[in-house]
Amino acid sequence: MNFIQRLGFFSVGLIMGIGILMFFLGGKKASCDYSPNARTLKNIRNKERVFSENALVYFSDNNLDTSAVTIILKSGNVDFGKSDTKRERCKIYFISEELESGEFEIEIENCKDKAIIKSVNKIQ
């Protein structure tokens, strides 16, 4: 068997394998969240969100929509140095992100079954 025949068999097998993988894995909503930042944000996103009175007042006073929290939780940066991750019950995280109206930092209390948005601050 010469090189061209081996290359042909290899190509057919490779294309069939890719097709089978695309068929079985195509509809899955799988994600690769391996960094601590991505795992923390995904953990918070998957929980029920509760807004504190302080956060709601900030949103209404500054004409911001609470959907900004969803944007921050998608691509924000967790400040682990400022966060309190050693707490027993609910850990405190500070997450910042640049939005159209400026850079914001939110303080979130991440409990077992819910995430409480405690405060929102605009970073100057």
Image (cartoon, rainbow, N blue to C red):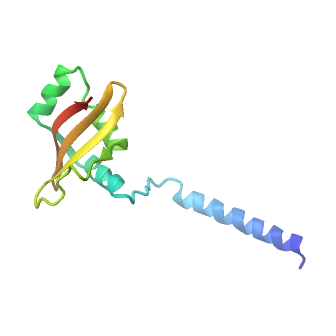
Q: Residue furthest bottom?
A: 1
**Quadrant, the N terminus:** bottom right
Q: Which percent across, then down, holds residue 65? A: 26, 26
Residue 105: image quadrant is top left
| Picture residue at 28% right of the left edge, 53% below the top | 43
| Picture residue at 25% right of the left edge, 49% below the top | 44
Q: How many labels does the image show?
A: 0
Asked if 94 appears above or below 16 in the picture, the reply is above
Asked if 25 appears above or below 109 in the picture, the reply is below
Choose between 9 and 52: the one closer to the eye. Answer: 52
Q: Residue furthest front?
A: 124
Q: Which percent across, then down, holds residue 93? A: 21, 48
Choose between 42 and 123: the one closer to the eye. Answer: 123
Q: Is residue 16 left or right of residue 9?
A: left
Q: Which percent across, then down, holds residue 55? A: 15, 32
Q: Which percent across, then down, holds residue 94? A: 22, 45
Residue 89: image quadrant is bottom left
Asked if 50 appears above or below 34 in the picture, the reply is above
Residue 32: image quadrant is bottom left
Q: In this view, does 1 lie to the left or right of 81?
A: right
| Picture residue at 33% right of the left edge, 37% below the top | 97
| Picture residue at 33% right of the left edge, 58% below the top | 36
